[in-house]
Image (spheres, rainbow, N blue to C red):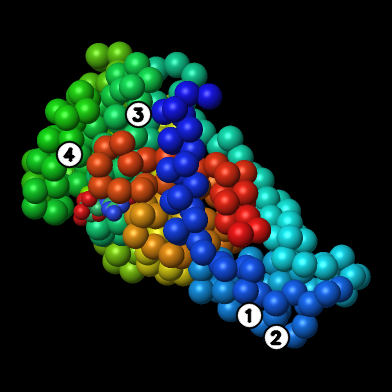
Amino acid sequence: MTRLFRTRIEKRKSIWRRAVDLALTDVGVLSGGMDHEALGSLEERLLAADFGVQATLRLVDVVESRARRGQLRGGKELCEALEEEVSKILEPARGAGLRMADSGPTVWLVVGVNGVGKTTTIAKLAHRLRQDGKSVLLAAADTYRAGAVEQLRVWADRVGAEFVGGRDSGDPAAVAYDAISAADARGVDVVLVDTAGRLHTNSNLMEELKKVARVIARRLDGAPHETLIVLDATIGQNAINQVRAFGQAVSVTGILLTKLDSTARGGIVVALQEEFHLPVTWVGTGEGMEDLEPFDPEGFTAVVFEDR
Ligand SMILES: Nc1nc2c(ncn2[C@@H]2O[C@H](COP(=O)(O)OP(=O)(O)OP(=O)(O)O)[C@@H](O)[C@H]2O)c(=O)[nH]1
Ligand SMILES: [Mg+2]
């Protein structure tokens, strides 16, 4: 194993170690089982780490029934039981890559509320794609926030991507349309469509987003190949409401989870999977363009439920 590869694995591990610290060794497992207090403490820790009510209840139930059958004799067995059950929850996320078109340009539409990291994550994905030898076009369909078009143009230059931007206050659907036409004409592999941040409660802006998705679908058969919602891992269970609300406007196919470097509540990946069965595909771990990691369910469970 190369040193670089080992360093990357260590970095990934340390992110999850920081982002989900359950301190399971402090949950008292009595010889032959867990008492009421220990179960309560486990439940509290899972909720505090943002596993969400649904996944937490499922996990505590599993632990309780194993304890009742005398299968939990210590911390190691507790960790194994949790790891096994969370692996089942995360199973659909395993190996979930982002879908590419069979031929012609691939279009990924990126949505989410204000400030969650949409534009930065698009830049990071574009950087990855460029490293993989793909040609990329960034479409600035955020014509709403002043400076948004320029922000994406700067990223396009930095990562070596082509760029199509609208005028401020222009029609975002028209930008997406023009971007796909340009990609088609120039033989570009992947178009990443950046959209304005919008509160999921703002119905006008949600209507506008529907129009963007509709126009993309009409312009190119099979597009968008992915509709990715960006979620800020630091906001907790509100992320669940955001997925639900955006899901009513557009058909969300995957989740990009940002700011894992700034949270101790990374259990949200489990809550999201349990609730929506939508894969978390990539996670953001900083502000730089290298700070993006593929989400790896096995790595996650191995680190989070390590008997430390
Ligand atoms: N620490 C950290 N900061 C991040 C990450 N991703 C994005 N940010 C920061 O979050 C802030 C907002 O990022 P943007 O990419 O502009 O967010 P946006 O969703 O496009 O925002 P709007 O277009 O205004 O809706 C910036 O300061 C980013 O550097 C991450 O993974 N970790
Ligand atoms: Mg933005």
Report the residue marked by disc 2. 37
Could you give the CA–CA distance between mark 4 and mark 2, rounded to whole angstroms? 52 Å
Residue 200 vs residue 297, the one in the foreground: 297
Could you give the CA–CA distance between mark 4 and mark 1, rounded to whole angstroms? 46 Å
Report the residue marked by disc 3. 128
Q: Position of residue 182 (x, y in %)?
A: 23, 21
Residue 110 vs residue 286, the one in the foreground: 286
Q: Amino acid at mark 4?
A: Leu
Q: Nearer the viewer, mark 2 or mark 3?
A: 2
Could you give the CA–CA distance between mark 2 and mark 1, rounded to whole angstroms? 6 Å
Report the residue marked by disc 1. 41
The residue drawn where x is 47% and y is 23% is: 2
Q: Nearer the viewer, mark 3 or mark 4?
A: 3
Could you give the CA–CA distance between mark 3 and mark 4, rounded to whole angstroms? 16 Å
Q: Is residue 181 placed above or below 46 in the rendered structure? A: above
Q: Amino acid at mark 3?
A: Arg
Of the two numbered discs 4 and 1 on the same chain, state the one appearing first in sequence: 1
